[in-house]
């Protein structure tokens, strides 16, 4: 009888130990799962980085144009038929985080964000001013075909900014911002080599 009671107690103790071990193991694996770095978890993080994935540039330009531009209610006094006009615009360049290609290999994370793109570009129609040589002042201008003007000037500005290295600077800055944001995660910072690629 005493032996049966002893065996019963031992069985209870063993069951208790097993339950505790199962609980600890479950907690450990849940913890591991919560902190696991997967493509899906990285995609979710990247989708929240829209704000730091682009850079906006404001600019002003002075251009030489001729009468074919079609300025409303204005007569060009220059006998050579050309005039100077200024305008201001804003261009946003960057990448789309949701289009990133992610690769995880051993302890390396590679994120290819694609090439820098012009995400938006607008020339402020109200900013157009013509230099009036006769009065030596700039006056507001309104064009008969503003959309055509905007289209041609946007292409010109975008080409100029590319040559000036604006896209390269944006790529470096955005890459650094995204890398810094991702490395806030302790697991990424401490256990992985992170490489963020942005083409120019």
Image (cartoon, grey):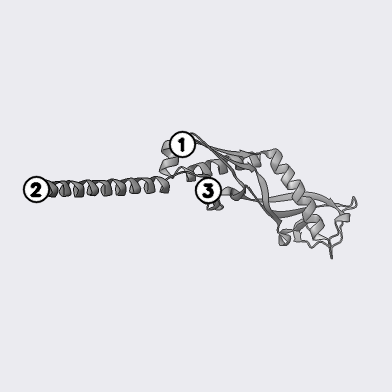
> Looking at this rendering, what residue extends furthest in the right direction?
79
Where's the C terminus, which quadrant?
top right
Where in the figure is residue 101, as x and y percent of width and height?
Answer: 60, 43
Q: Residue at x 50, y 48 (%)?
A: 41
> Looking at this rendering, what residue extends furthest in the bottom direction?
73
Task: Name the mark nearer the viewer: 2 or 3.
Answer: 2
93 vs 140, nearest the viewer: 93
Where in the figure is residue 125, as x and y percent of width and height?
Answer: 73, 61
Asked whether residue 132 is in view, the answer is no
Q: Residue at x 52, y 51 (%)?
A: 44
SS of the residue under disc 2: helix
Q: Earlier in the sequence, mark 1 or mark 3?
A: 3
Q: Which mark is residue 192?
A: 1
SS of the residue under disc 1: loop
Task: Name the mark nearer the viewer: 1 or 2.
Answer: 2
Left or right: 8 in relation to 162: left
Distance (Cα) linking label 2 and label 3: 58 Å
**Residue wearing tag 2:** 2
Left or right: 167 in relation to 193: right
SS of the residue under disc 3: helix
Distance (Cα) linking label 1 and label 3: 16 Å
Asked whether residue 187 is in view, the answer is yes
**Residue wearing tag 3:** 40
Q: Residues within 10 Å of mark 2 (few under 14, many from 20)?
A: few
89 vs 77, nearest the viewer: 89
158 vs 198, nearest the viewer: 198
113 vs 169, nearest the viewer: 113
Distance (Cα) linking label 1 and label 2: 58 Å
Residue 196 vertical position relative to residue 96 in the rendered view, above or below: above
């Amino acid at each position: 009888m005493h032996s049966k009671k002893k065996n019963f107690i031992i069985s209870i103790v063993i069951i208790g130990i097993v339950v505790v071990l199962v609980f600890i193991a479950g907690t450990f694996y849940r913890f591991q799962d919560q902190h696991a770095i997967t493509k899906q978890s990285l995609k979710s993080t990247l989708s929240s980085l829209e704000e730091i994935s682009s850079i906006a540039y404001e600019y002003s330009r002075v251009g030489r144009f001729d009468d074919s531009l079609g300025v409303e209610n204005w007569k060009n006094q220059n006998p050579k038929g050309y005039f100077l006009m200024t305008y201001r615009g804003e261009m946003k360049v960057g990448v789309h985080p949701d289009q990133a290609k992610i690769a995880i290999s051993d302890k390396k994370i590679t994120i290819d964000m694609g090439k820098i793109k012009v995400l938006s570009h607008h020339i402020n129609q109200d900013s157009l001013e013509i230099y009036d040589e006769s009065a030596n002042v700039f006056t507001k201008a309104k064009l008969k075909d503003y959309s055509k003007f905007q289209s041609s000037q946007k292409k010109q500005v975008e080409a100029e900014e590319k040559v000036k290295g604006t896209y390269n600077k944006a790529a470096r800055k955005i890459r650094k911002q995204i890398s810094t944001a991702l490395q806030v995660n302790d697991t990424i910072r401490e256990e992985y080599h992170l490489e963020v690629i942005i083409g120019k």
